[in-house]
Image (spheres, rainbow, N blue to C red):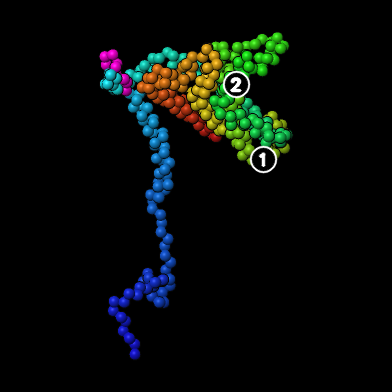
Amino acid sequence: MTSAPLKGSDRTPVGPLADGAGPGDPARPRRPRRPGRSAPYWFLMPTLVLFAAFTVVPIGYAIWLSLHKVQVKGMGLGKGAREQVWNGIGNYTAVLHDSEFGHSVLRAFGYGLIVIPTMLGLALVFALMLDTPKARSAPFARLMIFLPYAVPGIIAALMWGFLYLPDVSPFYYVLRKFDLPQPDLFADGNLYLSFANIAVWGGTGFNMIVIYTALRAIPQEIYEAARIDGASDLKIALRLKIPIVMPSLVLTFFFSVIATLQVFTEPMALRPLTNGLPTDWSPLMAIYDSAFRQSDIYGASATAVVLALATFVVSFALLRIADRHTREGQR
C-alpha cells in the first residue's frame, strides 16, 4: 500500500528542485547577485565628502567674503558698531586698481624668468647625463640631485638665508681672506637671484626625476637603431630623446609656472634677515599682509580669487598651446 502525501507538509524542496526542476531535469545553476549600480559611489563618498569639506567649501567661503566688507558706524566701538554688508565687486575693483599688487605680480614674473629656464634646463641636462650608457654611479647621483627636494622649503630658505649673511656665511669668510668683492645678496638687484637660487636648488631634482622617468620608458631599440646609423650620443639626445620627452617638459613647465605665481616661502622666510624686502614682495605675501597684518580679510579674499583666476587662465592657455603643438607634431 502507498500512503498519500501529507497535507500541509513543511518539507520544502532544496537544491535543483527548488527552481521547479523535476527529478529528471538538469540542474539550474544559481545566478550570482550583481552589485547595485550605486556601489561605486559609496566607495567614492569619503573622498567626495573630504574634497567638498576642505576644497569646495573654503573656496565658496572665500568668494562669499570677497563680495562683502565691514561697515563701521560712529566711532567703531561697542556692540553693533561694525557690521558686515554687501559690497559686490567693490573689493575686486580695489584689487585691480592696487598698484602695489601689480608690482608684486611683476616681481613674481621676473622671478619666474630666472627660475623656470634655469631649473628646467638643469633638470633636462642631468636627466640626459644619467640616461647615457657611460654614466657611472647613476643611482647615487640621482639620489644626490633629488635629495634637496626632500628638504622642507622653510628649512631650505633659512639655511640659504644664513649663508647669505656676511657675518655668519663661510662664503664671505673666504672672500674676505682673499680680498675679493663681497656682494650684498639682499640688495634690490640681487634679491631675485637669491630667491631663484633657493628655488632652483630645491626644485631641480623633482623635475629631473620626471624627465628621467620619461627617458627610461623609451624603448632601447630606438637608440640601437640610431647608433647603427652612426648617430652619436649628442645627436641621439638632441634629435630623439628631447622630442620624445617633450610632454614631460611641458608638464614640468606647467608646474613651475604655477609654483612661480605662488612663491611665498623663500621671501617670507628671508624677510626677517633684511630690511630691504617689502611685506608685499610676491602676490601671496600681499594676500598674507592684507589678511593678517591689516585685518582686511575681505580684500584679501578678493585678491586670492583674482590670483586663482589668473593662475587658471595662464595654466589653461599654456595647456592649449602645448596641445596644439603636440597635434601639429603628430601630423
- In the image, residue 235 lies at what x, y percent? 68, 30
- In the image, residue 131 lies at what x, y percent? 67, 34
Quadrant of the rendered structure where residue 142 is? top right
Residue at x 52%, y 29% (from the top left corner): 255
Asked if the stretch drawn in magenta spans residue 17, the answer is no
Residue at x 42%, y 68% (from the top left corner): 28
Secondary structure at numbered mark 1? helix
Amino acid type of the residue tagged 1 in the rendering: Gln
Res 231 seen here: no
Quadrant of the rendered structure where residue 182 is? top right
The residue pinned by badge 1 equals 220
Asked if the residue under mark 1 is in contact with the one under mark 2, i.e. CB atoms within 8 Å, the reply is no
Q: Is residue 55 above or below residue 68?
A: below
Q: Is residue 221 above or below residue 175?
A: below
- Front in this rendered view, residue 57 or 219: 57
Number of the label disc, if any, that sits on residue 160: 2
Q: Which segment is the magenta one?
A: 68-77
**Could you tell me how many numbered marks the image carries?**
2
Disc 2 to disc 1, how far (Cα)?
A: 41 Å
